[in-house]
């Protein structure tokens, strides 16, 4: 059965926002060679780990060795640094310039943007392919070893790094610095990103790997206005900026699939009022078949009243004209129309329709999990913000005019809404799948009824043949037994015996007896079946009472 244009398949392809980096391209995955480095082979650069319980120095050394032949093609490193409003932002810096900037003691802000999405080696993590010297410079400047272990791990694409927070204190147990590090995704088609920040009393350092282009554009807009540059120095500003951009992208992805779901719902729950003749015919036929459908119609009208903000209204429904009422059969026909040919519901390919909806369910599950990950990350950042606010000393420099915790409160509320509505859309999609199964069962039942009707007709024909056979059977039997010679076709012509009535006297009663026995046997058979059904009902009623 051909599956025609369906509401389950969006008429327009899913569009990605124009400010995103398109990641749908051929990716040349690197092979993962065996990790042969042992701890005794490590030099001091990699064996001296600040977190030896979490950092695998041998894995970092192996990963750096793999990048010894890397040319850095497609990898761009930009550095935003400076004090107050006196900021500089050189683009695509070379290793010498990067080393000079990262060794400057004066800057109160250093932000390294490492963009690897242009390289042909593939997705992050795993194919982290800057030049070896670039990695060493970043590592010396404070890039997290746990982050590098995650980048060089073969399983790290699905086994995410997790959220990290480290507090460092001086001899007087005063907070000296803190670090946060986390992995995130800004939509499904923009790669994997990381942020590692180091906040000291008078300086902030950020390592942003694959910072989203939308958030970066907003940051550049602020950078171009010199008077507004002080905003960049706010604690957690880059984090709230990227969280807001990520949330907008997830909202966009959810919205695209929501439109697909609403197309399916609207097709079944809303009539196509433009085709008046076909609609009138379907309505008349439905009214003749269902004279008591007023209750169902009123329930559906009330449902549409409350759903008008969620399901698009037809143009006719926004006029002052009185809305027509449609029965269940009409809405079913409209749903069939969205899946195939309305005049022949047998052309509906329920298999393809169900597979399309199952694909949508899989998307809802993935979107919900990603939104829950973002929500957990926002809670983590919010808790960190509150924890740091209570431990900063008077010698810390921070913007007291703004509270990042309030921004996180807003983002948490918005993300929680996305999580809950993603679950709602998942449940609604599952309801449509159940509806398809119900309609498929209805069609199967209709086919079974047609087969039963044809079988009944064949059975009636056989009964007729049997009755005609029984009609002639007694006479044939009598003639055979008596070898009747009531009629003599001799030379003198036709001669009829005076005892010819004996044939009728024997044949007619015997025929009546045969038919009587047959009718009686049929009646006894029906009564026996009815008795069995009645006994079965009594047993079911007793079982229900006992339960």
Image: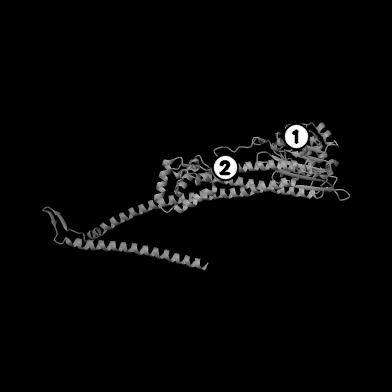
Of labels 2 and 1, earlier in sequence is 1
Measured as percent of width and height from the top left, residue 450 is found at 40, 50
Residue nearest the viewer, comparing 446 with 398: 398
Measured as percent of width and height from the top left, residue 334 is found at 47, 44
**Neighbour tally class for label 2: few under 14, some 14-19, many 20 plus, Cα within 10 Å:** some
Q: Which residue is mark 1?
A: 223
* In the image: residue 5, left or right of residue 290: right
> Mark 2 against mark 1, which lies toward the viewer?
1
Q: Which residue is mark 2?
A: 259
Q: Is residue 468 above or below residue 378?
A: below
Q: Is residue 216 above or below residue 388?
A: above
Measured as percent of width and height from the top left, residue 272 is found at 47, 42
Label 2, label 1: how far apart the Cα atoms are: 37 Å
- Say which residue appears at 20% left-offset and 61% top-offset: 504
Measured as percent of width and height from the top left, residue 134 is found at 79, 35
* In the image: residue 451, left or right of residue 3: left
Residue nearest the viewer, comparing 5 with 501: 5
Q: Which residue is at the far front?
A: 320
């Amino acid at each position: 059965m051909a599956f025609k244009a369906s509401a389950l398949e969006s008429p327009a392809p899913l569009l990605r926002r124009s400010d995103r980096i398109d990641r749908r391209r051929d990716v040349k995955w690197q092979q993962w060679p065996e990790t042969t480095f042992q701890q005794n082979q490590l030099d001091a650069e990699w064996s001296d780990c600040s977190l030896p319980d979490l950092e695998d120095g041998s894995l970092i050394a192996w990963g750096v060795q793999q990048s010894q032949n890397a040319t850095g093609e497609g990898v761009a490193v930009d550095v935003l640094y400076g004090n107050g409003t006196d900021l500089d932002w050189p683009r695509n810096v070379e290793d010498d310039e990067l080393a000079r900037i990262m060794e400057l003691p004066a800057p109160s802000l250093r932000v390294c943007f490492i963009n690897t999405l242009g390289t042909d080696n593939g997705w992050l993590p795993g194919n982290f392919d800057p030049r070896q010297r670039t990695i060493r410079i970043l590592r010396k400047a404070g890039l997290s070893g746990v982050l590098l272990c995650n980048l060089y791990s073969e399983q790290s694409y699905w086994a995410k790094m997790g959220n990290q927070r480290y507090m460092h204190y001086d001899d007087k147990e005063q907070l000296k610095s803190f670090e946060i590090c986390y992995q995130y995704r800004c939509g499904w088609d923009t790669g994997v990103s990381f942020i590692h920040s180091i906040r000291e009393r008078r300086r902030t350092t950020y390592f942003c790997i694959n910072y989203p282009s939308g958030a970066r554009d907003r940051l550049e807009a602020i950078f171009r206005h010199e008077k507004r540059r002080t905003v960049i120095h706010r604690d957690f500003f880059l984090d709230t900026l990227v969280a807001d951009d990520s949330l907008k992208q997830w909202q966009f992805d959810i919205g695209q699939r929501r439109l697909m779901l609403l197309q399916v719902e609207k097709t079944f729950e809303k009539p196509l009022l433009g085709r008046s003749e076909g609609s009138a015919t379907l309505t008349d036929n439905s009214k003749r078949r269902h004279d008591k459908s007023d209750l169902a119609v009123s329930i559906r009208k009330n449902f549409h009243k409350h759903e008008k903000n969620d399901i698009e209204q037809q143009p006719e429904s926004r006029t002052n004209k009185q809305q027509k009422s449609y029965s269940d059969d009409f809405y079913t026909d409209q749903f069939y129309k969205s899946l195939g040919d309305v005049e022949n519901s047998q052309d509906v390919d329920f298999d393809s329709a169900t597979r399309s909806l199952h694909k949508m369910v899989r998307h809802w599950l993935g979107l919900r999990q990603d939104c829950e990950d973002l929500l957990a990350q926002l809670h983590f950042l919010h808790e960190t913000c509150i924890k740091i606010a209570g431990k900063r000393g008077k010698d810390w420099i921070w913007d007291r005019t703004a509270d990042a915790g309030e921004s996180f409160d807003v983002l948490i509320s918005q993300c929680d809404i996305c999580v809950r509505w993603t679950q709602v859309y998942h449940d609604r999609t599952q309801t449509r799948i159940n509806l398809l199964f119900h309609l498929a069962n209805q069609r199967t039942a209709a086919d079974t009824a047609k087969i039963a009707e044809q079988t009944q007709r064949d059975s009636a024909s056989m009964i007729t043949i049997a009755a005609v056979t029984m009609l002639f059977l007694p006479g044939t039997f009598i003639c055979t037994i008596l070898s009747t010679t009531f009629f003599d076709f001799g030379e003198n012509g036709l001669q009829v015996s005076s005892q010819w009535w004996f044939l009728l006297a024997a044949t007619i009663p015997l025929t009546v007896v045969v038919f009587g026995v047959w009718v009686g046997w049929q009646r006894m058979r029906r009564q026996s079946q009815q008795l069995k059904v009645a006994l079965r009902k009594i047993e079911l009623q007793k079982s229900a009472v006992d339960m």
